[in-house]
Image (tube, rainbow, N blue to C red):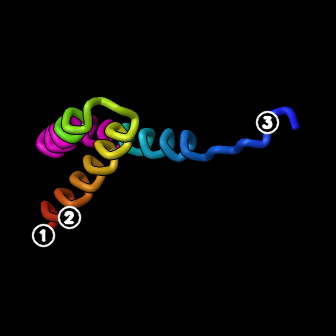
Amino acid sequence: MFGLAHADLGPLFYGIVIFIGLVSMWHKLINYRFFLFAAEAFVFWLVFALHGGTMTGGMSATIASLLTGIYLNMWRRK
């Protein structure tokens, strides 16, 4: 009736994913895992630049860097 019925959960999901990415990178930094931190930061920068700095690019870059961190962490433990 007043235009308040629109409930978009996209920004909430986006914020949660960005927060998880920041926590992941912060955890790597305070535990002196500089190679893993640099790898995540590089993948984020690369994907964000390839997407032209858009909001979709930020989401794609965050997910790509999180997946990179997970993969490299699993690879390092073998």
Amino acid bearing label 3: Leu
Which residue position is annotated with label 3?
Answer: 4
Kindly report the distance in space between the C-alpha atoms of the residues bearing marks 3 and 1: 52 Å
* Image: magenta residue range: 24-45
Which residue position is annotated with label 1?
Answer: 78
Magenta-drawn stretch, dominant element (helix, strand or loop): helix
At a point 70% along the width and 44% down the height, the residue shown is 7
Q: Is mark 3 on a helix, strand or loop?
A: loop
| Residue contact between numbered discs 2 and 1, judged by CB atoms under 8 Å | yes
Above-or-below relation of 16 to 73 = above
Kindly report the distance in space between the C-alpha atoms of the residues bearing marks 2 and 3: 45 Å
At a point 21% along the width and 60% down the height, the residue shown is 71
Classify residue 1 by image quadrant. top right
Q: What element carries label 2?
A: helix
At a point 55% along the width and 39% down the height, the residue shown is 11
Q: Which of the two marks, 2 or 3, is nearer to us in this view?
A: 3
| Residue 74 disc label | 2
At a point 50% along the width and 39% down the height, the residue shown is 15
Give the x, y percent position of residue 58.
34, 37
